[in-house]
Amino acid sequence: MSTLRLALSQVNPSVGDLAGNADLVRRWTRRAADAGAQLVLFPEMTLTGYPVEDLVFRRSFVAASQAALRRLAADLAADGLGELPVVVGYLDADGPPQVSADAQPGHGARNAAAVLHRGEVVAIYFKHHLPNYGVFDEDRYFVPGDTLTVVRVGGVDVALTICEDLWQAGGPFAVARQAGVGLVVTINGSPYELNKDDVRLPLVRRRAAEAGATVAYVNMVGAQDELVFEGDSMIVGADGTLLARAPQFVEHLLLHDVELPAAPEPVGGVGEVEGGMRIVRAEVSDPLPPAPGEVAVGGIIEPAADEAEVWQALVLGLRDYVDKNRFPSVVLGLSGGIDSAVVAALSVDALGPDRVVGVSMPSQHSSEHSREDAEDLAKRTGLDYRVQPIQPMVDTFLANLSLSGLAVENLQARVRGVLLMALSNQEGHLVLTTGNKSELAVGYSTLYGDSVGGFNPIKDVWKTLVWRLAKWRNADAARRGETPPIPENSIGKPPSAELSPGQLDSDTLPDYDVLDPILIGYVDGDLGRAGLVESGHDPAVVDHVLRMVDTAEYKRRQSAPGTKISMKAFGRDRRLPITNRWREDG
């Protein structure tokens, strides 16, 4: 047996920032080296950020990624880190893009992993399984690899794999068993979904059993547009034992000494074929002396409870969207209701109160308690609070237009949207919209009104979960001896848009405890009418809800991006035609 000190670098790269991401690798490799690491792993496409989407088709970007990789190898050696093998994900290509006229069969852009050592790129692996479901379009971008790369590090044979290779049985992990490796490393850009951590550990255990080897799983952390990555990196022994597990939603260096079987001598077997894949082997480093100091134990961090986990995901998603796009601050309308209160609390947690502006925009229909609740939230959180009544502006419109009913309600929402966008133009804030997933599903919003904004932190959060998050956040604050950020009145009162006298959401929608289970079945679960009725839902209510969902697609297509936390988010996950005559009720 041999011992390898593994360093799993759970880092937060930015798409397109090749120089910044390379510096990230250099800094974290230095930390790993100082801790005595003997093999350092970075996540999928760390060098380019992930996902790069149609940047794949820009040959200039592909060439820049390849050049950055070679430069990174040289820079690590210049930093005195050349003897430490580093596995890093990047964008490669061995031919023109598949969409180009000069495309070559079996060649093109590659989702790749490289081993850097002594100033050189000493081994490369191309991702074999390419996901093409949910948020993934990798069949659009990449050509699959057909070779398992096995590198010998410190006397141990190590197989390289990338993300989806782990999620599919067979392929690289089965071939890794045939190759007799002691360790399989899998570098990942695996997006967060609620309860995905419950699936991931059993999955890694299954692949460890399939490969007959220890598996080191490193996942990125951070957010890219709608996607958020929670880390949750881990090492699982060949027998399924969880050896170490990193925390979620923070950058982290997971260091752990792993006992692994020594590889047979000599290296050899280059080009051998197992299970339809070639095996290519390379010697990277000689047998190593024991790592210095005490035995490194990475520890096991248990995943957070559901509400805590979702809150952390939403905070990280908002923070990275704002910071990576270089917005100085955010602005949102504070109505006194639960949705805007939760978005405000998320914003303060993500950015600090000095970077959050909340604007109360009362009309003649805004209740006194709603104004008081908005002010109370501002005092609790310390955000920049402003009051701008909208009734004089609404009256000016009505003096020049003959409007009534719903048109007047929507006019109020649109005046508020104009005000928020004016503040954005004047002061540089990013406007946050505050509609929850239930409202987006049924079209309960005003285009260019309350839907105005550049980002929606709760776009993928069902209304019933919004309430749960608010209660959890307040309880968490109380547990830590802090002031709960969300007024109890905002949590307890019946939801209302307050656009007409005495208006309540329940005037138009079923109670959210009834509505959300139908929406979850239809949107997340793809159940049809029959399946929903068989599940126990009232047929008339199902018909009403499904009609609202189906006719609101054009609104959702124009909605702001927002952090994905469910199995099927609007936008990247759920893609339906706007013009669509199919209805579940026939």
Image (tube, rainbow, N blue to C red):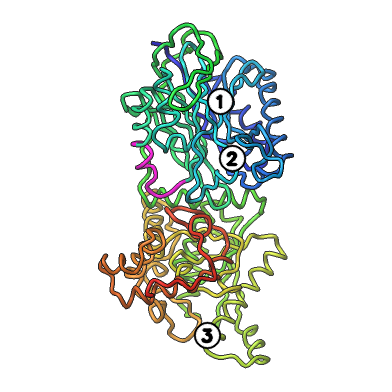
When the figure is inspected, residue 557 is found, relative to residue 193, above or below; the finding is: below
Residue position for label 3: 406
Residue 531 or 48: which is nearer the viewer? Answer: 531
Q: Residue furthest right?
A: 60
- Tag 1, which secondary structure? strand
- Tag 2, which secondary structure? loop
Q: Amino acid at mark 1?
A: Val
* Label 3 Cα crowd, 10 Å radius (few <14 / some 14-19 / many 20+): few
Mark 2 or mark 1, earlier in chain: 1
Residue position for label 1: 87
Q: CA distance from mark 2 to mark 1?
A: 20 Å
Residue drawn at x 38%, y 10% as measured from the top left: 1
Residue 288 in sight from this viewpoint: no
Q: CA distance from mark 1 to mark 3?
A: 59 Å
Residue drawn at x 66%, y 23% as measured from the top left: 73
Q: Amino acid at mark 3?
A: Leu
What segment carries the magenta color? 192-202
Q: Are marks 3 and 2 in contact (CB under 8 Å)?
A: no
* Label 1 Cα crowd, 10 Å radius (few <14 / some 14-19 / many 20+): many
Residue 433 or 509: which is nearer the viewer? Answer: 509
Residue position for label 2: 142
Residue drawn at x 46%, y 14% as measured from the top left: 156
Q: Residue 259: x percent and y percent? A: 39, 16
User: Is 115 within the magenta?
Assistant: no
Q: Amino acid at mark 2?
A: Phe
Between circles 1 and 3, the one closer to the viewer is: 1
Q: Quadrant of residue 85?
A: top right
When the figure is inspected, residue 520 is found, relative to residue 177, above or below; the finding is: below
- Tag 3, which secondary structure? helix
